[in-house]
Amino acid sequence: MSIYDFRVDRPFSYNWAGKFEAPDENWIHMTRELVDYELILMTEGVLYIAASEKEYTVKKGEYALLVPPCHQFGLKPSKCSFYWVHFSYNDNRNDHHTYADHEIQGALPREEKRILLPDIAKVPGLDRMIVQMKQLQDCDRKYQNRNQNSFLLTAALCELYSQLYLPGGAFVKQEHMQLYTDIVDYISWRIRDNIRVSEIAAYFGYNEKYITTFFKRTGGTSLKAYILNRKMELAKAMLTDTNLPIAQIGYDIGFSDNHNFSSAFKKVTGQSPSSYRNTYSQRQMFHQ
């Protein structure tokens, strides 16, 4: 795995973005010379793609970051769908630094003006990233303001870095981190249910007070708030990326009635579910 090091004291330069769905099982990614960066965020299926000598199998829930210059081409048919965005870095110099995975183990750069992004990885908070990609497309469609798009893109890349490397992230190694990640995985597994803190404590064999204090100390967010925020991230993705009725979405993520769901959603986002859907639901569907 290669890990790319970027400075973010100024934004990346947005070029264009969209969502792609393969028309059939015989679709193969185009062949071209890639002259800017491409981030691919997989939502369904598997994409088989190459960037010069490197071959990638990108599965649902993963991303791939392809860097220029490279010869990009499909390896074999890929029945899949994904969000994508093309961008440039450092005034089109595209001069990121590259580490091998073993070079940064235990020595993670923690400057606020730098981010690290592996070339391929599982996205811990896929729903959150989908919402940000939707917001980027919506902004591009409404305002066509490249400067604004660039800041939104930079925020999305920083979000991806945070999910991977900041406390609670996928690649962080620290004392007792295994229990924290096990709890996060359990919540992801049960996210569509009405999860209670007492159930989580009992599942892992701890009392409720300990598990609550431990989770807040390790991840910086209370366990109840984390569960609610994860449910709302899933709800936002479903509101923007499906046509399901709002009441059905609430039921699907563990709310017994539409009133409770709408109240919780507005508490977290500041908008009603219908208002949020109207703001971000338009999708761009064309080839990348």
Image: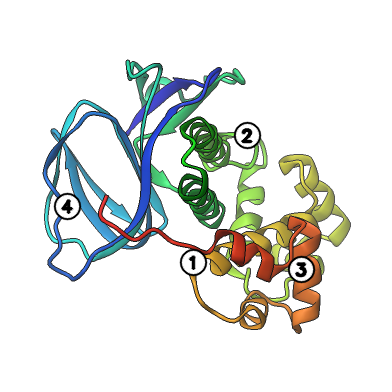
Q: How many marks?
A: 4
Look at label 1 and name its amino acid: Asp
Colour scheme of the picture: rainbow
> Dot 4: what SS?
loop
State the CA–CA distance, disc 2 to disc 4: 40 Å
Q: Position of residue 47 (x, y in %)?
A: 25, 55
Mark 1 or mark 4, which has the lower sequence index?
Answer: 4
Q: Are marks 1 and 4 in contact (CB under 8 Å)?
A: no
Q: Nearer the viewer, mark 4 or mark 3?
A: 4
Q: Nearer the viewer, residue 277 or 248?
A: 277
State the CA–CA distance, disc 4 to disc 3: 48 Å
Residue 13 higher or lower than 63, as above or below: above
Q: Nearer the viewer, residue 93 or 196?
A: 93
Q: Residue at x 39, y 22 (%)?
A: 89
Q: Which residue is mark 4?
A: 29
Count neighbours of disc 2 (C-alpha within 10 A) and say few if under 14, some if 14 to 19, many if 20 or more. few
> Dot 1: what SS?
helix
- In this rendering, position of residue 169 left or right of residue 48: right
Q: Position of residue 101 (x, y in %)?
A: 37, 28
- In this rendering, position of residue 223 left or right of residue 230: right
Mark 2 or mark 3, which has the lower sequence index?
Answer: 2
Q: Residue at x 34, y 36 (%)?
A: 119
Look at label 2 and name its amino acid: Gln
Q: Which residue is mark 3?
A: 202
Q: Which residue is mark 1?
A: 241
> Dot 3: what SS?
helix
Q: Which residue is mark 2?
A: 174
Q: Nearer the viewer, mark 1 or mark 2?
A: 1
